[in-house]
Amino acid sequence: MSFRDLRNFTEMMRALGYPRHISMENFRTPNFGLVSEVLLWLVRRYEPQTDIPSDVETEQDRVFFIKAIAQFLATKAHIKLNTKKLYQADGYAVKELLKITSVLYNAMKTKGMEGSQIGEEDISKFKFDLGSKIADLKAARQLASEITSKGASLYDLLGKEVELRELRTEAIARPLEINETEKVMRIAIKDILAQVQKTKDLLNNVASDEANLEAKIEKRKLELERNQKRLQTLQSVRPAFMDEYEKIEEELQKQYDVYLEKFRNLAYLEQQLEDHHRMEQERFEEAENTLRLMQNKLKEEEKRLLRSGSEPGEPEAALSDKPAWNLSPPERPGTDNLQIILKIYEFGLRFKERPAGTLQ
């Protein structure tokens, strides 16, 4: 709820001519009586002929009142209201009430003050609600069809009136015979007595059926009582296998605890093994990188020695008599480094050929 919405609502209600003074403090707490009164006044302002019950004493009556108001405004004025906020009857209901008052206020502004002062009776003269006449239209159509059918049957009967008049006159003029009348009366009495006897038989059958049903009900009640007693007896008696079941259950719980412990240990060992494999793989990669660097370094040193052995100050015969790689081991440059590099390379090959998961 904003102060501007509450102020606009009070000003619009005052402009529309609401007889009661509405202050900004009325909606600080839920006030369903004021909200219902305002809603009813606004709906009657919009449609004087509407018939909405104003009883809001019980919770059911309030819900019905809010639903009726929302349905009326949705169908007539195309205004969609939030029924939950209206039922709260606090500041949130002001926004919903503002939707109705803004429509009426804008209509009053467009028509001017003279249009807003027209009485409800003058408005009702020119108001024609087609929705309320649909039921009357259906009833009128049904009555028209019935009148047509009744008129056709009446026309047929009037066409037979000439023949029926003569037969009726003859029947009235004919004297009554006592014997024939008694015969007809006896037949009628006999039929009535037969119907009475049939009705009595049906009543007797009903009584017998009722007695059978009562007997079956009593039988079912006795069976139910016996079954309940048996159930209580079975519940009170401890089964013979219950002790063994409890022991097995305790043993199962112990085995489950052991299983959990072993499962956790296995998971921990697998994790440790994976970490160990990863560390070995990192060491192997580091050794390969070191070996590659040493190979590059040896190649560069060999090239440097070859370049230094072919300098212009030394004769070719000396080079041919004493090659660089025919020197004795102590005189050969980089021999110790070469052996170390070869050993690292062989270790890397062995580690690479070793199957996964083995430790040496």
Image (tube, rainbow, N blue to C red):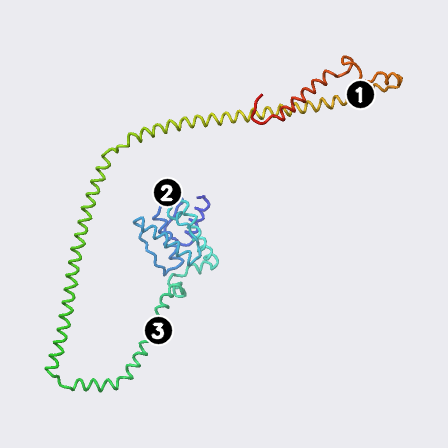
Alpha carbon of mark 3 to alpha carbon of mark 2: how far? Answer: 58 Å
Residue count near mark 3 (Cα–Cα under 10 Å), binned few <14, some 14–19, many ≥20: few
In the image, what residue type sits under mark 1? Arg
Q: Residue at x 35, y 48 (%)?
A: 34
Residue 316 image-quadrant placement: top right
The answer to whether 78 appears left or right of 157 in the picture is right
Residue 244 image-quadrant placement: top left
Q: Earlier in the sequence, mark 3 or mark 1?
A: 3
Q: Residue at x 15, y 58 (%)?
A: 208
The answer to whether 324 appears left or right of 84 in the picture is right
Q: Earlier in the sequence, mark 1 or mark 2?
A: 2
Considering the numbered disc 2 on the image, is that residue within a helix, a strand or a loop?
Answer: loop
Q: Position of residue 70 (x, y in %)?
A: 39, 54
In the image, what residue type sits under mark 3? Ser
* Label 3 vs label 1, nearer the camera: 1
In the image, what residue type sits under mark 2? Thr
Q: Position of residue 5 (x, y in %)?
A: 45, 46
In what quadrant of the picture does the C terminus appear?
top right
Considering the numbered disc 3 on the image, is that residue within a helix, a strand or a loop?
Answer: helix
- Residue that mark 2 sits on: 29
Check residue 304 in the rendering and tell me which mark sits there, or answer none.
Answer: 1
Q: Nearer the viewer, residue 219 or 59?
A: 219
Residue count near mark 2 (Cα–Cα under 10 Å), binned few <14, some 14–19, many ≥20: few
